[in-house]
């Protein structure tokens, strides 16, 4: 996805100055940035705790403005809960598609326990965030079609080495590493790599 996500600076400034606008920007950031979607829960927790604290101190000082900060804290708390639930579904999608080779949306939805319409919408969102980079949804067969890169990254079987190596060549074996962030299995050559789905560093 080529579109740059909204800067965290603008999100935080908007939350401090006028939290309803900040909430809108925060939702847009979480829906456009795969790293924010998977790792944003901790930041959201800090945000609503800070707003609750500011609101509480402001109320103790006799100002009703504190109620606005508390309301903002409640809004971010609810957003954090929804984001956690969505990330949990995202991890299930990735496990089913990459580790169990399920591609038909009806089957995926049945395993996740949601409607096919919601599954299709969320899978498309994952494609838009490059979690399933280069993938597409076939509206005729109602399945997700992975890109060649994703096809190569999925699964848990180490591929055979077909190339000829001389005695001086260093052989780097391919290994399968499970991402700690999203749970997807990735084929990695060398010491480090990056999850093909959520971008988390692998070692």
Image (tube, rainbow, N blue to C red):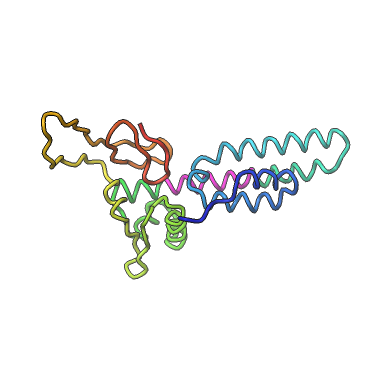
Percent position of residue 97, x then y = 33, 51
Is 82 magenta? The answer is yes
Task: Return the residue found at the far bottom.
Answer: 140
User: Residue, x 75% and y 42% (percent of image)?
Assistant: 69
164 or 26, which lies in front? 164
Task: Return the residue found at the far right.
Answer: 62
186 or 69, which lies in front? 186
Magenta stretch: give its range: 77-91
Percent position of residue 85, x then y = 51, 46
Q: Is residue 122 above or below residue 180?
A: below
In the image, 143: left or right of 36?
A: left
Percent position of residue 126, x then y = 44, 53
Is 133 magenta? The answer is no
Q: Is residue 61 above or below residue 84?
A: above
User: Residue, x 61% and y 49% (percent of image)?
Assistant: 26
Quadrant of residue 161 within the rendered picture: top left
The image shows a total of numbered marks equal to 0
Percent position of residue 9, x then y = 64, 43
In the image, 181: left or right of 16?
A: left
User: Residue, x 59% and y 50% (percent of image)?
Assistant: 6
Placement of the N terminus among the 4 image quadrants: bottom left
In the image, 116: left or right of 36?
A: left
User: Residue, x 11% and y 33% (percent of image)?
Assistant: 166
Our reading of the magenta stretch's main secondary structure is helix
Placement of the C terminus among the 4 image quadrants: top left
């Amino acid at each position: 996805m080529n579109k740059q996500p909204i800067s965290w600076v603008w999100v935080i400034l908007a939350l401090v100055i006028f939290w309803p606008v900040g909430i809108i920007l925060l939702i847009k950031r979480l829906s456009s940035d795969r790293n924010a979607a998977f790792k944003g829960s901790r930041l959201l927790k800090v945000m609503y705790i800070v707003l609750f604290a500011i609101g509480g101190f402001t109320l103790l000082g006799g100002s009703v403005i504190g109620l606005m900060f508390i309301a903002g804290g409640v809004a971010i708390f609810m957003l954090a809960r929804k984001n956690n639930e969505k990330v949990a579904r995202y991890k299930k999608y990735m496990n089913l598609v990459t580790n169990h080779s399920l591609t038909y949306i009806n089957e995926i939805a049945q395993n996740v326990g949601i409607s096919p319409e919601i599954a299709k919408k969320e899978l498309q969102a994952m494609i838009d965030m490059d979690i399933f980079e280069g993938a597409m949804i076939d509206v005729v067969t109602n399945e997700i079609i992975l890109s060649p890169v994703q096809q190569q990254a999925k699964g848990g079987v180490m591929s055979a080495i077909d190339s000829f190596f001389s005695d001086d060549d260093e052989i780097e074996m391919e290994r399968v590493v499970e991402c700690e962030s999203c749970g997807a299995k990735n084929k990695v050559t060398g010491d480090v790599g990056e999850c093909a789905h959520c971008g988390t560093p692998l070692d």
